[in-house]
Image (cartoon, rainbow, N blue to C red):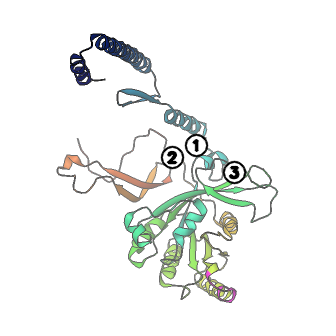
Amino acid sequence: MTEKNIRLINKFLTKKKNTKKKNTIKNSIESIMQKIWEKKEIKDETVKNKKNELKNTKFERIFKIFGFIKIERKKSKDLYKQREKVKELNFEMYHPLEKNWMAHQPTINLMTIGHVANGKSTTMEALSGQITMRHTSELKRNITIKLGYTSFKIFKIPNKTSPECYVAKSSETKEYVDPENRQKAELVRHFSFIDNPGHQIYMRTMLIGASVADGALLIIAANAQNCPEKQTEEHLSATTMLGLNSLVVAQNKIDLVEHKHAAKQYEQIMKFLRRNSLGNAPIVPICAIKTKVNIDALCAHLIKTIKKPERIKKAPSRLYVIRSFDVNKPGEIKEPNQFKGGVAGCVLMRGFLRVDDELEVRPGLVTT
């Protein structure tokens, strides 16, 4: 109750002719106001005590919202647990198939290649549950323009035959329990995926993604007019020239064609791979949208075909910057000192980086 309200009440009471009613109303108002001020004093005292108690607390964050104190501990506890888990990891004994490392982060880098509108981003969504097209221009045109990124885990269910034993889940999935036999699945792979654009004018972007990949997933649409299409041929040629021979082919959109057409295209894909010295690469017919037909078979071939990369561990750390994000809003920058910088998407090619390490970006401007 504000002072303005109190003045209005007093003005109202002065107009009352009956003094008894006026006194009773005034007494009741005074008693209510007394209780309100007592509660406010108690609240102010508790807030002061909380502030004093929180001064020496390390992992608690305080937010002031409308004069009240809100304590958030969950994020700080999660951050503390993450740092403790990192301490448990053995950097010298690193291996891309070591369980603790796979649970912590993706250990093998893959990329998608193929012609535009063949279903590369849709296949990534079927494996990871995430959409790689994030920019407004990409969503409007329904094509990948900049390098997309996602990651996923592959779990193996015990006492099941291949490929039904393999399940693809997002990287956030800590463990998977089979709903049929109630058995806990084993984590066997943790892939990071770079989603390359398939349009001709974005060939340069595709080459950037290929320079940091350990393997490739070639997507070919079953309803394509020609096999191979122009960008499919260019993507595969660039991939082989970079020395990348770990390849799995996904014949996508098989639900849109008849069996005879799919079989005929399968033979065309085989001839195309043989011309590029990749005749042993597996071809998996899939349907990436809705029904997700043969996604488990695709996971099985990714595990079997993609070779385990050899990492250079005892060497100075080197990051390859493959994409960047500008955090400055257009129209807001008037002076150079108003720039906020940006976010760089990098791939660690050798060495190790730990939390709180200081990085020096080269080449760059030396400032004093």
Q: Tell me the SS state at disc 1.
A: loop
Q: Tell me the SS state at disc 3.
A: loop
Q: Is residue 1 above or below residue 227?
A: above
Magenta span covers which residues? Answer: 256-262
Q: Which mark is residue 176?
A: 3
Closer to the eye: label 2 or 3: 3
Residue 120 location, x and y as percent? 53, 71
Closer to the eye: label 1 or 3: 3
* Residue at 23%, 21% in the rendered image: 12
Q: CA distance from mark 2 to mark 1?
A: 8 Å
Residue type at tag 2? Phe
Residue type at tag 1? Phe
Using a 10 Å C-alpha cutoff, classify the residue at mark 3 as few (fewer than 14 neighbours), some (14 to 19) or many (20 or more).
some
Q: Is residue 148 visible?
A: yes
Residue 40 location, x and y as percent? 37, 17
Quarter occupied by the C terminus: top left
Question: CB atoms at circles 2 and 1 under 8 Å apart?
Answer: yes
Q: Is residue 87 above or below residue 203?
A: above
Tell whether 178 sits left or right of 217: right
- Marks 1 and 3, the one that precedes in the sequence: 1
* Residue at 48%, 75% in the rendered image: 238
Q: Which mark is residue 352?
A: 2
Magenta residue check for 261: yes
Using a 10 Å C-alpha cutoff, classify the residue at mark 1 as few (fewer than 14 neighbours), some (14 to 19) or many (20 or more).
some
* Residue at 61%, 81% in the rendered image: 256
* Residue at 80%, 63% in the rendered image: 161
Q: Is residue 278 visible?
A: no
Which residue, given by chain and number where applicable, does mark 1 sit on?
A: 91
